[in-house]
Amino acid sequence: MKKPVVNEDLCIGCGHCVEVCPQVFELENEKSQVIGSDKCGSCNCQEAIDTCPVQAISWSG
């Protein structure tokens, strides 16, 4: 099963992924964290990946 992952070295903490998928992502210490990788069915994780300005989010698995 594919799950979203965040490369914290690339993340700039813009928060766009949180706006798109608040059930999956949250900002902690100004970096995005995956909090609900099993919740992609409730939002559009692919949109969060595609619109990340620094390509810090990808699929794993």
Image: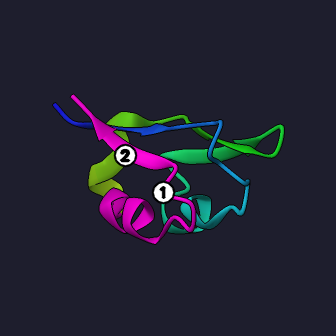
Quarter of the figure with the C terminus: top left
Residue drawn at 68 percent across, 61 percent down: 15
Left or right of 20, for residue 39: left
Left or right of 28, for residue 16: left
Left or right of 46, for residue 14: right
Q: Amino acid at mark 2?
A: Ser
Q: Amino acid at mark 1?
A: Gln
Q: Position of residue 8 (x, y in %)?
A: 63, 36
Magenta region, residue range: 44-61
Residue drawn at 65 percent across, 37 percent down: 9
Q: SS at mark 2?
A: strand
Identify the disc placed on residue 58: 2
Identify the disc placed on residue 33: none
Taking depth in this image into account, of 41 and 5 the one nearest to the observer is 5
Residue 58: in magenta span: yes
Residue drawn at 81 percent across, 46 percent down: 30
Q: Is residue 50 above or below residue 22?
A: below
Estimate how packed mark 2 is, as few (under 14), some (14 to 19) or many (20 or more) residues with alpha carbons within 10 Å: some
Taking depth in this image into account, of 13 and 23 the one nearest to the observer is 13
- Residue at label 1? 55
Q: SS at mark 1?
A: loop
Q: Is there a contact, CB below 8 Å, between mark 2 and mark 1?
A: yes
Residue drawn at 21 percent across, 36 percent down: 2
